[in-house]
Image: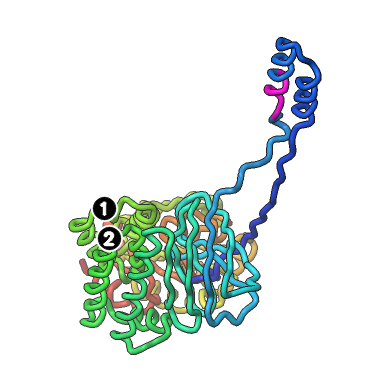
Amino acid sequence: MPGNQFSFPKHYATSRSTTTRTLNTSVQRSFALIGAVSLLPIALLAFTTAGWHCQPRHSSPPQQPEGVWLQGQLEGFNQPALTVYQWQGGHSTLIDTFHITNPSSFSVFIPLKDTAILMLYHQYPLPIVAVPGDTLWIHWNLSLPYAYEIRGNTAATQLNRALQEVTRLRQALTGERNPFLQALTLRSLPPESPLFRQYTQMLRQIIIRCQNPACLYFLYEFLTYEQLPVLTALIDSLHATQPELFQGFLWSDLQTRYQKLKQSAVGSPAPPITIHNPEGQILSLYALRGKVVLLDFWASWCLPCRITARQLRTLYRKYAPLGFEIFSISLDTSRQRWLRAIQEDSLFLWRWHGCDFQGWESPILRQYNIQSIPYAILIDREGIIRARGLPPLQMDSLIRALLQQ
């Protein structure tokens, strides 16, 4: 099952080719003719004819592919290869793996069409702002987290400095030297905790001092429903004081993901749903307006989902007479397995079952930003999302309160 935004990267391979230029034989013959014939009109005619055909379209060499050169020194490099990913929106996609024969003086070419953040992976990931056409020089001590120096473009240098500053801040607040443990400790803190507030305030100052749009990279760690209020406050504050930060290549992607979270966040109207039930009839979420609805995302092949069904039955028997309804959306791709699971788990207690047989490609999942199942979303009588991501039984008191309104 898909995990959260820190999932393993999807891999794809890239290939490179080299080309060699050759002189067109027609050019050589034409110049020989010029040398042999002294009459100027004939010479000019031969030269003109050759000129029109010296670079035939079918034999023109392909242009050098766009990209960036990475050169420099790798200290403490104890592996035969260096892996490079392209980072986008919290996910990393494999570009290539390069065999490094001389770590003290390495040079690799990365095909790249647009400005992007590359991730060099060894023991720790190293983010680099890369611009097509650049040559970046890197001195990286791989035995220490983020102990590196970059020269070649201003954005890469400024992100480098900011990242080292953020790493020192995280270490001071958490007491952890490992960057992964630092991030894990901070993510486990409640957003309202004093330590977390201190971290976000100091992070904001680091981004302001960075003065480069690439430093919006640090805001991606707050792209969760739990941290959405924190992210909103940071974006509003930075936009008011440093509007130039929001004109770079990262803001478009961050804004898209941010708006997508807001559309299905707690307090937002529930996006519309239309889907077919087992009888082929169309079900619409709007038809349940006036009831408290629990959206249940599940699948027959998901064991935790099948276990959670017991909690759903308890809630339905308890609150259905008071105006409570369950709307189950299945990620199954097999109609037979879907219907069999409904019977086996006694989910026929409620009649609101839908499936579009598209699995994880279902547009409903994208609307509600569902990354894992089982997943429950609670909607009030007016169609507003009131809770999401909690186990059904933890919504018991909230369901009761909404029914009493």
Is 37 covered by the magenta stretch?
Answer: no
At a point 62% along the width and 79% down the height, the residue shown is 79
Contact check, label 1 and label 2, Cβ < 8 Å: yes
Please provide percent x and percent y for residue 328: 47, 64
Can residue 343 be seen in the rendering of this structure? no
- Mark 1 or mark 2: whose residue is earlier in sequence: 2
Q: Which residue is mark 1?
A: 244
Q: Which residue is mark 2?
A: 211
Which amino acid is tagged 1? Glu
Please provide percent x and percent y for residue 223: 36, 66
Locate the C terminus and report the quarter of the image it occupies.
bottom left
Quarter of the image where one finds residue 42: top right
Please provide percent x and percent y for residue 20: 72, 45
Asked which secondary structure carries label 1, the reply is helix
Q: CA distance from mark 1 to mark 2?
A: 8 Å
Horizontally, residue 36 falls left or right of residue 69, namely right
Please provide percent x and percent y for residue 11: 61, 63
Quarter of the image where one finds residue 257: bottom left
